[in-house]
């Protein structure tokens, strides 16, 4: 199904979304994950990047920054990146940015409740989502998925943005692989 928005507008929106996703704020980040129960994650040692078809991708710099953040986290967990066909696991990411309206009402002289005059303003909030997926390379089955969603607040400092992106990815991948049951 084709999007009603021109391709260039989708590309700009995705790029802005990636930049914003990397930006920090004190606002909470919502992280969810799920995995294939009974999967022996100890058997996965290597991974290879794959692209999800028909998915908008960010500009090259943002793509490199997201991949670097994910690779850094996977590296600390002992996973090794490969470009050959001998990978145990295939990984991919997706991004999305949604806009929500926030309404703020202010009352005066007794407030709206008592018949006084009031003012209501609206503002647009950008909400970004980063989804990470892992697949068993041999079985071609998804073994893990996680998503991190947060309200976005941009910064003009690229180093700060990368640091915040890394923190977000670390939080997203905190339970990858899932903790072993005792």
Image (tube, rainbow, N blue to C red):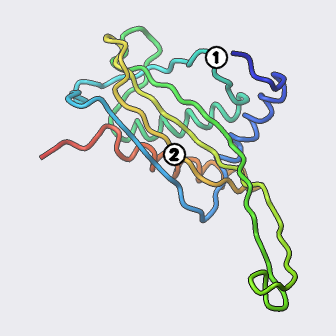
Helix, strand or loop for disc 2: strand
Q: Position of residue 138 (x, y in %)?
A: 32, 10
Query: Which corner quadrant of the image does residue 9 belong to?
Result: top right
Q: Is residue 84 left or right of residue 14?
A: left
Q: Is residue 117 left or right of residue 105?
A: right
Q: Which residue is mark 2?
A: 148
Q: Is residue 140 above or below residue 68?
A: above
Q: Position of residue 81 (x, y in %)?
A: 43, 24
- Residue at the top extreme of this rendering: 85
Identify the residue at horizontal 70%, vertical 30% (top origin). Answer: 58
Q: Earlier in the sequence, mark 1 or mark 2?
A: 1
Query: Which corner quadrant of the image does residue 8 belong to?
Result: top right
Identify the residue at horizontal 29%, vertical 29% (top origin). Answer: 36
> 175 or 33: which is nearer to us?
33
Q: Position of residue 120 (x, y in %)?
A: 83, 70
> 118 or 154: which is nearer to us?
118
Identify the residue at horizontal 83%, vertical 67% (top origin). Answer: 121
Q: Which residue is mark 1?
A: 54
Mark 1 Cα-neighbour bin, 10 Å: few <14, some 14–19, many ≥20: few
Q: Is residue 143 left or right of residue 114?
A: left
Mark 2 Cα-neighbour bin, 10 Å: few <14, some 14–19, many ≥20: many
Helix, strand or loop for disc 1: loop
Identify the residue at horizontal 24%, vertical 31% (top origin). Answer: 37
Q: Is residue 100 above or below residue 37?
A: below
- Distance from the alpha carbon under mark 1 to that under mark 2: 21 Å
> 2 or 27: which is nearer to us?
2
> What is the number of callouts on the image?
2
């Amino acid at each position: 199904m084709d999007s009603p928005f021109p391709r260039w507008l989708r590309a700009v929106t995705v790029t802005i979304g990636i930049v914003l996703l990397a930006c920090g704020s004190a606002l909470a980040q919502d992280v969810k994950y799920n995995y294939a129960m009974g999967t022996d994650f100890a058997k996965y040692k290597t991974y290879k990047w794959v692209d999800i078809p028909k998915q908008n991708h960010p500009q090259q710099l943002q793509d490199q920054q997201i991949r670097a953040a994910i690779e850094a986290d996977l590296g600390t967990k002992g996973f090794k990146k490969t470009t050959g066909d001998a990978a145990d696991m295939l990984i991919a990411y997706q991004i999305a940015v949604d806009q929500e309206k926030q309404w703020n009402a202010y009352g005066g002289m007794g407030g709206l409740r008592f018949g006084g005059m009031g003012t209501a303003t609206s503002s647009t909030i950008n909400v970004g989502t980063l989804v990470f997926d892992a697949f068993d390379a041999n079985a071609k089955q998804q073994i893990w998925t996680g998503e991190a969603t947060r309200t976005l607040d941009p910064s003009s400092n690229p180093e700060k943005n990368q640091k915040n992106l890394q923190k977000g990815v670390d939080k997203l991948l905190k339970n990858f692989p899932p903790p072993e049951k005792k």
